Amino acid sequence: MSASSSIQALEYLQGLPLQTHRKLYEAPSTVLAVFRCMLPHLAKSIVMAMLYMPSALPAADLEAWFKPSARREREQALSILDRLHILTSKREDDRSLSYSLSQGFQRSLRQAIEGSGTHRTFGVPATKAERREEKLGIDFLDQHARTQWEGILFFMVSGAAGFAPGSVKMDVGPGTKQLLHKGDLVRTVHETPKITKEGFTFVLQETNAQVWNLLIVYLRMGHELGMSETEVLSFLFMLGSLELGQDYSTSTLSDTQLQMLDDLSAMGIVYRSSKDSRTFYPTRLATTLTSDSGALPGTDISTNEKTDSKAQNKGFIIVETNYRLYAYTNSLIQIAILSLFTKLQHRFPNLVSGKLTKESVHRAVQSGITSAQIISYLTTYAHPQMQKSNPPLPPTVMDQIRLWEYEGERVEVTTGYLMREFGSEVEYRDVQGYAEALGVLVWKNDAERCFFVSHVEQISAYLKKKKEGRGGR
């Protein structure tokens, strides 16, 4: 599990109450995932040292394990274990303090390591009677995961990049779109999805971190969807322990987890042939949730042909001092991302070229993308020849991108009048429409029923006339 992924998941887990943790720790698969992926190495060492202790460990004995210079590291490890309710402390009197592992966590971790118990929390392989079709291969599962996840990414960037709706067939379900909006990763403007600053940060993350980011939004929406937070978390941790290419039975899943299968299948995290199917397959997006492995092998979204993952992560962008940009790619996602802040001019089978301009950077800034994010993206994917320089991008280009952002953020002062406190929504809409028709409307806020105009004389006369008309009746 990547560092950024584990940080996101750890922060979420630390915010859960004691009762939720106790229920989570009843599942050995959850406990093993938390132990493997959420805990720093020092905290793992403490847990393993205490796992088979018959009684509580005095604090003095625990301190003896550490050098005096490692006090800070010890306190950090103990703090994480305490916030996750893995370690409990007890004071017998004013002097003696002792530590012990929470009983549920200790019992479940022992079962996970020993392979004991009848908990069945690591998934139940499907039987021949449950399997209605031939067993699916890993290539098929990878293709399903890749198509669904890249469809989500393309949906996020396509609107702001200027791709016409339906120009590229990407199947993104309404539930997934709701998640993206709930997480403020995209916003709908004039019926077109526009990526936000947070969305652009999301796109720049590695796939495993992206998956966790979206799943945490899903977890926070659990109550709205009528789902049990504990069961959702337990199922996600269970998926991380399953075997890629193996089909599993749905017979042991709860109603919440069966509902999750449909949602996770739309994201490409699992595959289920139909809602009636008694089996499901975890994809690579699922089996790497709690590991350090890459979530998906490289691919080209425009052709659905596999590419070497190392080649995909290799830099492909060249930026010249005259702001010209060349990108050796035919990936629609990468082209769409570049078009968010670049004026693209030419496209060839494996190359696109364009230019960083004041207008293209201003457009990106207005969409919520910062100059730091643009520079970070160009630096991350700079061509290997450019990576030999320090910094990889020409300093003049980086400075100009920042200056263009500052220009776009300058405050413009407009003299005028604020109109507010309307008697009704109808009256507000009527007067605001009149101001817009006159061409004097500068700004409006429909939620607060107020707007700003550059000239008020004609609007005052209009309001006076309406008032007299009502008085005459």
Image (cartoon, helix red, strand yellow):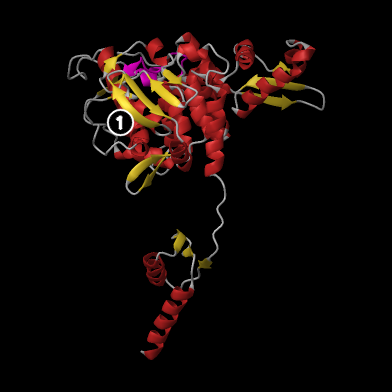
Residue 111 point in image, percent of width and height? 48, 14
Label 1: which secondary element: helix
Residue 317 point in image, percent of width and height? 43, 20
Position of residue 66 relative to residue 443, above or below, is: above
Q: Can residue 254 be seen in this snapshot?
A: no
Magenta part, dominant SS? loop
Question: Where, quadrant-wise, is the C terminus in this rendering?
Answer: bottom left
Q: Quadrant of residue 246?
A: top left
Residue with the most extreme front position: 322
- Categorize mark 1 by other alpha carbons within 10 Å: few (<14), some (14-19), many (20+): many
Image check: 68 left or right of 456?
right
Image check: 385 left or right of 250?
right
> How many labels were placed on the picture?
1
Q: Residue at x 39, y 64 (%)?
A: 436
Residue 254 point in image, percent of width and height? 35, 31
Looking at this view, is 402 or 166 the one in front? Answer: 402
Q: Quadrant of residue 215?
A: top left
Residue type at the position of mark 1: Ala
Q: Residue at x 33, y 14 (%)?
A: 244
Residue with the most extreme bottom position: 472
Q: Residue at x 50, y 68 (%)?
A: 420
Q: Which residues are magenta?
A: 284-299
Q: Is residue 291 magenta?
A: yes
Residue 381 point in image, percent of width and height? 45, 19
Residue with the most extreme right position: 95
The residue to which callout 1 is attached is 266
Q: Quadrant of residue 296?
A: top left
Q: Can residue 138 be seen in this snapshot?
A: yes
Looking at this view, is 404 or 14 the one in front? Answer: 404
Image check: 82 left or right of 219?
right
Q: Is residue 186 magenta?
A: no
